[in-house]
Image (cartoon, rainbow, N blue to C red):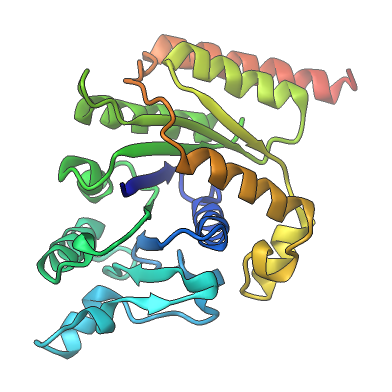
Amino acid sequence: MCRRIALYGKGGIGKSTIASNLAAALAGSGLNVLLIGCDPKADSTRNLTREGIPSVLETLARSEEVSIQNLLHTGDFGVSCVESGGPEAGIGCAGLGISTTLEELTRLGVYDMDWDIILYDVLGDVVCGGFSVPMRKKHVDTVYIVTSADFMSLYAANNILKSVKRYSYTEKPLLGGILHNRADSAKERAVVQEFCRKTNSAYIAAMGQSTEIRLAELQRQTVLKAYSDGAAAQAFLELGRRMAGPGQASVPTPLCPQDMDAVGAAILRLLQDEEAGE
C-alpha cells in the first residue's frame, strides 16, 4: 500500500534537503519513490538530478501534448522526480503550480502507478493558500513538520498545525509528527519536545548540523550518494525506515498566542543560559 507523505515547515528550515535525502534513503532501501516538489523555486529534486528539471508549468507552457515521460525525471537511486514550478517571486500565487501539478498527475494516471512512497516537499509560505492544496485535496496521508528550536520556526510550525487540524478528522488524523532539524543541544531538544507535548505532536527525530550534508549539497548530491557510509546517511536510512512504517498519526492541538509567548520565554531563557555559559 502506497504511503503519501508531505513535509511542511518554515521556509529555509531544510525541508528540501531532508526531502531529497529521505527520498534517496527510501529508494536505496528498495522502495519505489515519487518525490514531488511543491515550491516555485523548484529545488526539491536538485540533489537527486544534479541539474534543475523542467517544471510541470514550464512543460505545459511549451506543449499542449504532455506525457508521463515529460513530467517524471529519474534521479539517483531511481527516485522519480517532479517539480511543480510556479511564478517568479512577487508575481502570482504558488497554489497555481501545485494545483495544476496534482491535476495533471491525476489526469495522466501517475498516482495509479505502483508507488511505495509518494513524498511531497511543500513551500514554507503558510499565508499562501497553495501550501494547503495537498491536504485540502486529500493527496496526503501523513504530514511531518520540520522545525528548529528558533521561535519563528516554531511559530510557523504552530500555524501549519492549525491547517493540519483543519484537514484532519477523528477517523483520519494527518499529523505524523515533528522533525527537529538543526538540533544541536539537549536544551534545544527540550524546547521542541515541550512544544510537541503541548501540541499533541510526536517528536520523530533530532537531526543536528552536518558537515557531510553541507558538502554533499555543494556537490549537488545527497549524503547517500556522496558519503554513503557516513553518520548522516545512516541517520536518513533510519528515518526512512521509521517513516515508511505505519506509524501513529494524531490530530494536533495548536497553541494560542499566550502559549506561544510562553514558548518564546522558554527560548529566551535558553539563550540567556548559553550567554552566561551554563
Residue 162, horizontal then vertical, whole percent: 30, 26
The quarter holding residue 249 reads top left
Depth order, front residue of 73/90 = 73
Residue 258 falls in image quadrant: top left
Give the number of marks. Answer: 0
Please give the name of the residue rendered at 14% of the width and 71% of the height, measured from the top-left corner.
108
Above-or-below relation of 133 to 222: above
Can residue 107 be seen at all in this image of the molecule?
A: yes
Vertical side of 73 occupied by 175: above or below? above
In the displayed structure image, the side of residue 275 where residue 152 appears, left or right? left
Query: Residue 157: image x %, image y %?
Result: 43, 32
Give residue 58's position: percent from left, percent from top.
Answer: 25, 81
Residue drawn where x is 49% and y is 55% of the image: 19
Q: Judge from the rendering whether residue 264 lies leftward or rightward of residue 129; answer left or right.
A: right
The residue located at (22%, 18%) in the rendering is: 170
Query: Viewer-proximal residue, 120 or 132?
Result: 120
